[in-house]
Image: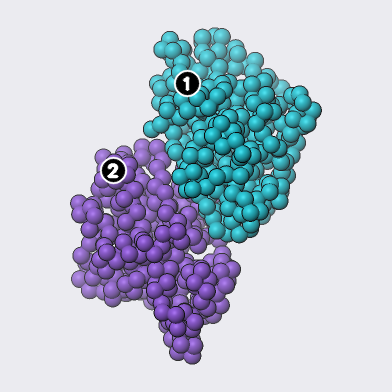
Chain colours: A cyan, B purple
Amino acid sequence: VTIDDVRAAAGRLAGYAVRTPLLESSALNARAGGRVLIKPETLQRVGAFKFRGAYNRLVQLAPEQRRAGVVAFSSGNHAQGVALAARLLDMPATIVMPADAPAVKAEATRGYGADIRFYDRAREDREAIAAEIATARGAVIVPAFDDEHIIAGQGTVGLELVEDAAAMGLQLDLVAYPVGGGGLVAGGATAIKALSPATEVWGVEPALFDDTRRSLEAGERLGVAPGSRSLCDALESPAPGRITFPIIQQTVAGVAVVTDAEVAEAMRYAFAALKLVVEPGGSVALAALLSGKLEAKGRTIALVLSGGNVDPDLFARAIRGEL
Amino acid sequence: VTIDDVRAAAGRLAGYAVRTPLLESSALNARAGGRVLIKPETLQRVGAFKFRGAYNRLVQLAPEQRRAGVVAFSSGNHAQGVALAARLLDMPATIVMPADAPAVKAEATRGYGADIRFYDRAREDREAIAAEIATARGAVIVPAFDDEHIIAGQGTVGLELVEDAAAMGLQLDLVAYPVGGGGLVAGGATAIKALSPATEVWGVEPALFDDTRRSLEAGERLGVAPGSRSLCDALESPAPGRITFPIIQQTVAGVAVVTDAEVAEAMRYAFAALKLVVEPGGSVALAALLSGKLEAKGRTIALVLSGGNVDPDLFARAIRGEL
């Protein structure tokens, strides 16, 4: 994946994806002791960056592939991205989703016209289910992150960050991304390192899902412990991708890890100080900053808030300090 | 107040106020049957448009006035705007605030360094208290809306709306503003009618506080019934202003009125579909659209979401459907 791939994706997305703004809060700047730019992908179509990669993948399918449609497995945001991209391109879509996915994500996916096949996380294999559906229908499987077109699409978040910071006369010292399977950070780091080599790119993972951090230390792809769960449903990926991991090895300066309590506090802070609705997985970069795990003092940094699809009851508990 | 006053205010605010973006949601467009642009003043400094007018007023005070400082009475957002503007300009500020103002607004006002004098809504006269403090200290009273510099400052919301819509190649058919005392809509309508005379400007008021709607019908300033209360704490103004009302008479096409239930539903919708935290008073224009009280079909309209300062418990109840 190269900067040219990311630029080509940006061309395909123009007029379809939202060019999300860069926001700034004087309260957050004061607390960080530096300048903090917020990239709210919460305001993206489907409420998360995932639309970018999904659309960039689906729009490149051949006409006969479009007729047979697509299959994806996802706990929610990739599901919505694929469902909306498929609807815009007039293709059928089936999503294989865990039965305990957030209700708001399942409803939205159905709202974009996709069929949902729920599965039991403990007893069924989502990849096998997706492969079976794909074979039966001649449909294309759309991976959540381990795909060059998906990575290039997510990379447009990083491209916009560098361009829009430059338009403000700013050079970014550090950019922090949430990391699940690594598509967002791999694409973003590709764009950022090409355009602004001095910018450090950091990943942030939730506790128990620090597989990318441990894999970077080990120099090989390691998985999470079976049965692990996190408040950050969007970041519960079992291991770094075969394609994303080598990119991350070459481009990412470090990975911070945050606890569920730090994530809940970041959600509360985003509500109170930024007036933004951010889901748990979308809050990890902010959580890392607020808990002192990213070095912001005297620097210009950017945080990607990657999604805002959260059930009202969970959000209510987070802002009341009940999580 | 003229477009030149609004332009001059915009010059004073450049680099101090946030130029809030224009946001768009395909779900909201589909629901409205038109194109809906959102101006989120929730993302403004202090979480509400009020910073614009307050800064435009305070920055024009003479050096000897700055030393004596300012006094304002406000239930919260104007208080925060005055407090922050005073801090930026190194002036003392005292705010006269009802004892039952939202806690989040009182805390933030104190956080900006202002002194707060709480009063009892039922038994004390806030104007008398403010006048007494002003006399004792030689301080300037900063009105919440009935002041030409305040109106010109709030008018920059309308100026940005027209400029940014034009940059997107759009002409606005209608712009809807929340209305309390009328500073925001009077300033905004002044800018909009000067730059885009065909654009209809609408106000939206909460039930029981439809004093501007009734005053327009009567052709004279009428007040609200004593003791009235609304979910929209930010819009509980007793009557249109002496300066704002004639401007509104000349520029505003109509005023819609929304119920507390419609406001709560708009807060829930902004959370779920727009991923924005909007306070009750900030939600009334969206509430008017969602309840069919603004004509959006086939048109390009803009809604000002004027503030996002809401106590977590109230917000939690709104998004859970408990209001």
Q: Position of residue B150 (x, y in %)?
A: 36, 70
* Frontmost residue, A190 versus B71: A190
Q: Chain of mark 1?
A: A
Q: Chain of mark 2?
A: B
Q: Position of residue A93 (x, y in %)?
A: 49, 21
* Frontmost residue, A190 versus A275: A190
Residue at the (46%, 25%) spot, across then down = A8
Label 1 belongs to which residue? A58
| Distance between the alpha carbons at the discs numbered 2 and 1 | 29 Å
Residue at the (67%, 34%) spot, across then down = A252
Question: In the displayed structure, does residue B318 sit left or right of residue B253?
Answer: right
Residue B170: numbered disc:
2
Residue at the (32%, 42%) spot, across then down = B168
Rendered image quadrant of residue A11: top left
Q: Is residue B56 visible?
A: yes
Q: Position of residue A283 (x, y in %)?
A: 62, 44
Residues beneath discs 2 and 1 located on the same chain: no
Q: Position of residue B46 (x, y in %)?
A: 50, 62
Name the amino acid, label 1: Leu
Residue at the (52%, 52%) spot, across then down = A24
Q: Is label 2 in contact with label 1 (beta carbons under 8 Å)?
A: no
Q: Quadrant for the N terminus of chain A, please.
A: top right
- Total residue callouts: 2
Name the amino acid, label 2: Leu
